[in-house]
Amino acid sequence: MHEFKYKNNQLYCEDIKIQDLAERFGTPLYIYSYHTLIDHFIKLQKAFCEIKPLICYSVKANPNLALLKALVDKGAGLDIVSGGELFRALKVGCPTNKIVYASVGKTDQEIEEAIRCGILFFNVESRPELENINRIANRLNKTTNVAIRINPDVEPKTHKYITTGKLTNKFGIDFESARQILLLRKALSNVHILGLHIHIGSQITESQPYIAAITKMVDFIGHCYKDGICIEYLNIGGGLGIIYDKETPQTADTFAKKILPMLKKTKLKIIMEPGRFIVGNAGILIAKVLYIKSTPKKKFIIIDAGMNDLIRPALYDAYHNILPLRCTSYELRCTEKVDVVGPICESADFFAKNRKLPYFKEGDYLAIMGAGAYGSSMASNYNSRCQPCEVMVKKNKAFLIRKRENYKDLVRKEIIAVQIS
Ligand code: PLP
């Protein structure tokens, strides 16, 4: 599943001892395994090889340029949600005909930039947005491709903050409104509606919600044909879940087995937008134990990483496995119930609560697993903390792919206007 394994009781990333990386680069430190990243992409590609989908890695999961470049070099397209992500996609040389652009709030500037560079299509999330894209394309004297993002109103059985395909969510367009838009498509002379898109949520561990959503889409596409509307692409979004704890998510193969027959029947070109599935278990966060604090009720392991570095536990109550870098029979035998917390002034600043973990002492390092997706991409400078550096390991080589921030970086964009005082 991933290339973070114990060898001789020491945790390794591929062929490098993680302790050495922690000492060399300092902590907190994000470490990515190149081979795990690429392996996940290839697993998906192979599982769906019969229909040769365009796999557009979802940049928001982890937008580091080195990761994007590694995936683009293997043939991935990119799923973007902002002008900034488009900038990154272009910077790593992603072919523009492999870029798809979702988001409920694209600005005029972002739309113009994407039209000018000729992306494959916009995933349009509302009628006003479609009309705006048409207006901007007209002003630029261009025609641009779009897919309508449908909100299929299905329950993805995941956390409510990452549920996106229910009608109470802000995303996509309901079937009836989408049909009205498609019927009026000729009035919009500068957009070419050539696809339909869904993205029903994230960390979805069962295939049933996809089956429910795709069934509805197949039915809708049938009605479209009857109305004389021709669809070329079906984008089934991302959302594939991974193992953080005791989940048993579908593998690429079992997922393909369930939905391939339906996709093949559509005879459409298929697009997928996985993020977490590709990068989630390809990255970990290493932190150092600063203090052990015992109170009458608890024992706290205070580490040098905080919720600003990895917000998932605070935001979603997410579980991340925590491992020692050294795992001898002593570590396996001696466990105690602790809270692992960061230095930030919030009680939500935790990585584990009442968790049975090996004994850690001050100065030890620990690994927070499954931190590759929505980890560094959601990091902030809260409490004026410098964001960690990031390292990519390929076999026995480690490459710095993001420098650690320093204090100057923290204030670089701020201005003390003398007139104020
Ligand atoms: N596509 C869209 C439109 C999204 O909003 C997201 C995530 O929010 C993704 C793809 C990627 O989701 P995941 O990382 O769960 O695969």
Image (cartoon, rainbow, N blue to C red):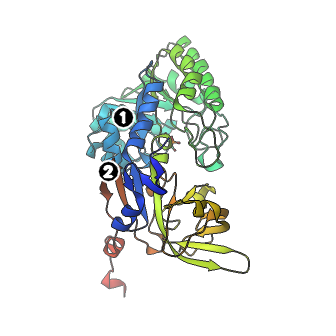
Residue 132 visible in the picture? no
In-image side of 268 versus 66 (left or right): right
Amino acid type for the residue under numbered disc 2: Asn
Crowd rating for badge 2 (residues with CA inside 10 Å; few <14, some 14–19, many 20+): few
Q: Which residue is mark 2?
A: 396
User: How many numbered markers are drawn?
Assistant: 2
Name above or below for residue 102 compared with residue 309.
Answer: above
Is residue 367 in view? yes
First-in-chain label (2 vs 1): 1
Q: Nearer the viewer, residue 137 or 121?
A: 121
Q: Nearer the viewer, mark 2 or mark 1?
A: 2
The residue that appears at 36% across and 35% down in the rendered structure is 77
Q: Position of residue 387 (x, y in %)?
A: 40, 66
Q: Compare residues 381 and 110 and report the one nearer the observer.
A: 381
Query: Which residue appears farthest toward the right when viewing the image?
Result: 297
Reading the image, the residue beneath label 1 is: 76
Q: Residue 414: x percent and y percent?
A: 34, 74
- In the displayed structure image, the side of residue 340 where residue 275 appears, left or right: left
For label 1, the crowd category at 10 Å Cα-Cα, with few meaning under 14, some 14 to 19 and many 20 or more, is many
Query: For the residues marked 2 and 1, what is the alpha-carbon distance in whole angstroms?
Result: 25 Å
Residue 97: where, in percent of width, then height? 32, 31
* Closer to us: 85 or 208: 208
Is 159 in front, or is 194? 159
Amino acid type shown at disc 1: Ala
The residue at the point 35 percent across, 46 percent down is 67
In the drawing, what numbered circle is on residue 228?
none
